[in-house]
Amino acid sequence: MLRRVFSLIVAALLIGMYVLTLIFGLMQDPRTPGLLLGSIAATILVPVVLYGYQRLYRIIRKE
């Protein structure tokens, strides 16, 4: 049950980051390039970090 809740939270977080990336890409503001790059970086880094935590948890839990 906890795993499903965590999965839904992560999915909502990723969807939110995709929506923000789209909004930042359409904005007409001088800060847009920085916001867009930050959003794209977070879209890539957050799943990678979560995957790393999951792998470490599985390794530590087995011992």
Image: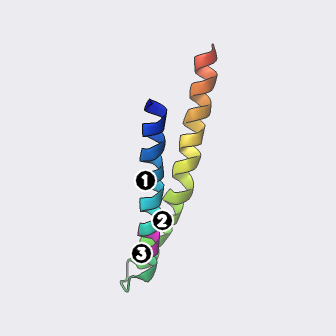
Please report the residue visible at 45 percent of the width from the left and 30 percent of the height from the top.
Answer: 1
Secondary-structure class at tag 1: helix
Work out which residue is located at the far bottom of the displayed protein and give it.
Answer: 28
Q: Residue flagged by tag 3: what amino acid is it?
A: Phe
For mark 1, what is the residue?
13
Query: Who's the residue at 48% across and 56% down the image?
Result: 14
In the rendered view, tell whether residue 54 sits above or below residue 62. below
Pointer 1 or 3: first along the chain: 1
Q: Is residue 17 left or right of residue 59?
A: left
Residue range highlighted in magenta: 20-24
Q: Main secondary structure of the magenta part?
A: helix
User: Is-magenta flag for residue 42?
Assistant: no
> Hey, what amino acid is under mark 1?
Leu
Residue 42: image location, x then y, percent: 49, 57
C-alpha span from label 2 to label 3: 10 Å
Q: From the viewer's perspective, is the residue at label 1 or at label 3 nearer?
A: 1
- Is 22 part of what is drawn in magenta? yes
Residue at image mark 3: 24
Drawn side of residue 51 relative to residue 28, left or right: right
> Quarter holding the C terminus?
top right
| Count of labels in the image | 3
